[in-house]
């Protein structure tokens, strides 16, 4: 990935969709108190009250998550049971995580499968995971999976995350060489500067995992 392509894609996305991003920031905020300890996750307040509403109103997945038989209690229970796997990844970021580490891969596999219940498909799984750890999990959809030639299952998702890290590192390293600074400094700059400021300072900083998703979405749904 070229740095200029990353920036252009994110800026186009932000210019077009800045208004609905309030829902994204609000969902992250409302889940902040349970992210470090999913044993406190509540079916009503967190899973149906935030995650379900996020999938409907931000993700445009009303038909998917509104299906009769989708068991939100089961999802809550499975997320709680996977709390140790989520904890393994808590505090890490896309840049510093090692996707070749067996324990890391196992944690991602376990968290993915925890969300993999009836009527929750690969796209929705990634959105739920991102809400629970926005630093590591990158969202995807069918077009993005086709672009990167990955399968819509747990192993495919690990391969996707590994590829996303490699792609964004390439772009950041290019910019770091131009500026004579570190990759980490470039990452902090784009996470701070690229998101729209129209919602105010409080909602103007995103994670690198979210920045990559915006680029991916724009590059697969629009021509750069």
Image (cartoon, grey):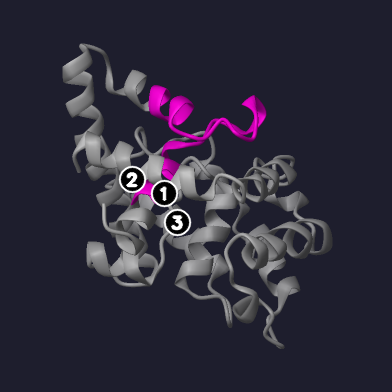
Reply yes or no: does residue 118 show up in magenta.
no
Q: Is residue 111 above or below residue 38?
A: below
Please report the bounds of the magenta region as a residue range: 188-215
Query: What is the x, y in percent for residue 197?
Result: 56, 30
Dominant SS in magenta: helix
Residue at left offset 24%, top offset 64%: 147
Q: Is residue 103 visible?
A: no
Residue at left offset 16%, top offset 19%: 177
Number of the front mark, 3 or 2: 2
Which residue in the protein does label 2 denote? Answer: 9
Query: What is the x, y in percent for residue 216?
Result: 34, 54
Query: What is the x, y in percent for residue 6?
Result: 29, 40
In the image, which disc is placed on residue 139? 3
CA separation, marks 3 and 1?
9 Å
Counting other residues with Cα less than 10 Å from the Cα at mark 1, is it few (<14), some (14-19), or many (20 or more)? Answer: many
In contact (CB < 8 Å): disc 1 and disc 2: yes
In terms of depth relative to the viewer, which is nearer, 111 or 13? 13
């Amino acid at each position: 990935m070229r740095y200029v392509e990353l920036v252009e894609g994110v800026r186009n996305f932000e210019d077009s969709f800045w208004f609905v991003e309030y829902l994204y920031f609000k969902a992250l905020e409302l889940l902040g108190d349970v992210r470090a300890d999913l044993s406190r996750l509540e079916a009503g307040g967190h899973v149906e009250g935030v995650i379900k509403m996020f999938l409907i109103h931000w993700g445009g997945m009303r038909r998917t998550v509104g299906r009769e038989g989708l068991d939100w209690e089961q999802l809550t229970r499975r997320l709680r049971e996977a709390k140790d796997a989520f904890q393994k990844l808590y505090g890490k970021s896309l840049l510093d995580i090692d996707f070749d580490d067996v324990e890391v891969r196992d944690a991602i596999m376990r968290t993915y499968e925890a969300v993999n219940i009836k009527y929750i498909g690969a796209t929705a799984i990634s959105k739920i995971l991102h809400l629970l750890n926005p630093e590591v999990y990158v969202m995807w959809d069918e077009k993005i999976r086709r672009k990167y030639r990955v399968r819509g299952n747990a192993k495919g998702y690990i391969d996707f995350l590994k590829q996303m890290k490699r792609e964004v590192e390439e772009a950041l390293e290019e910019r770091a060489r131009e500026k004579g600074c570190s990759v980490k400094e470039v990452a902090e700059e784009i996470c701070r500067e690229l998101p729209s400021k129209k919602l105010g300072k409080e909602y103007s900083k995103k994670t690198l995992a979210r920045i990559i998703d915006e680029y991916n979405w724009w590059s697969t749904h629009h021509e750069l």
